[in-house]
Amino acid sequence: MDPLKRALTNVSMERMLRVINLLRQHDRELPAQLMATFLYVCSHNPCHKQALEEDLMFTTASGSRNVNWLSDKHRLKKPGLGLINCDRDPSNRRRLLLKLTPKGLSISKEIESILYD
């Protein structure tokens, strides 16, 4: 009988799998769109919500849903993940400014460690 195949054949893909599993520790059913939102904020910290929506080709509603989930207040009165802050931009009160929280910054650094160490 053949043993289960578990030989690692691609180290880069295994690192990406570790990153996805790190993010899934916060919510097992984390959608790819939410991961993309978090990684966008990590790579553009701080950034405007409108820029995120344009660059990721999200609708305004989709952008809002993902931002809310990553901040303190998820919709349907559930707690959010607390990875980003969403505040009004002081230079233009109509814009929302997204910034990593200390928890989000810690996860961002952990992702970098997985990918590049």
Image (tube, grey):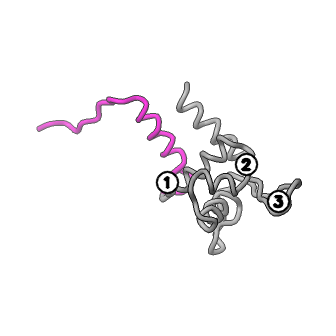
Pointer 1 local density, CA inside 10 Å: few below 14, some 14–19, many at least 20: few
Looking at the image, residue 80 lies above or below residue 52: below
Q: Nearer the viewer, mark 3 or mark 1?
A: 3
Determine whether, in the image, residue 15 is placed left or right of residue 59: left
Whichever of callouts 2 and 3 sits on the residue coming sooner in the sequence is 2
Separation (CA) of disc 1 from disc 2: 20 Å
Quickly name the residue at label 2. Answer: 47
Whichever of callouts 1 and 2 sits on the residue coming sooner in the sequence is 1
Q: Estimate the x, y position of residue 11 in percent, counting from the top left.
A: 40, 29
Quickly name the residue at label 1. Answer: 32
Q: Estimate the x, y position of residue 31 in percent, counting from the top left.
A: 50, 57
Q: Which mark is residue 88?
A: 3
Whichever of callouts 3 and 1 sits on the residue coming sooner in the sequence is 1
Q: Nearer the viewer, mark 1 or mark 2?
A: 2
Q: What residue is drawn where x is 64% and y is 71%?
A: 75
Give the residues in magenta: 1-28
User: Mark 1 belongs to which amino acid?
Assistant: Ala
Q: What residue is drawn where x is 62% and y is 61%?
A: 63
Separation (CA) of disc 2 from disc 3: 11 Å
Q: Is residue 90 magenta?
A: no
Pointer 2 local density, CA inside 10 Å: few below 14, some 14–19, many at least 20: some
Looking at the image, residue 73 lies above or below residue 8: below
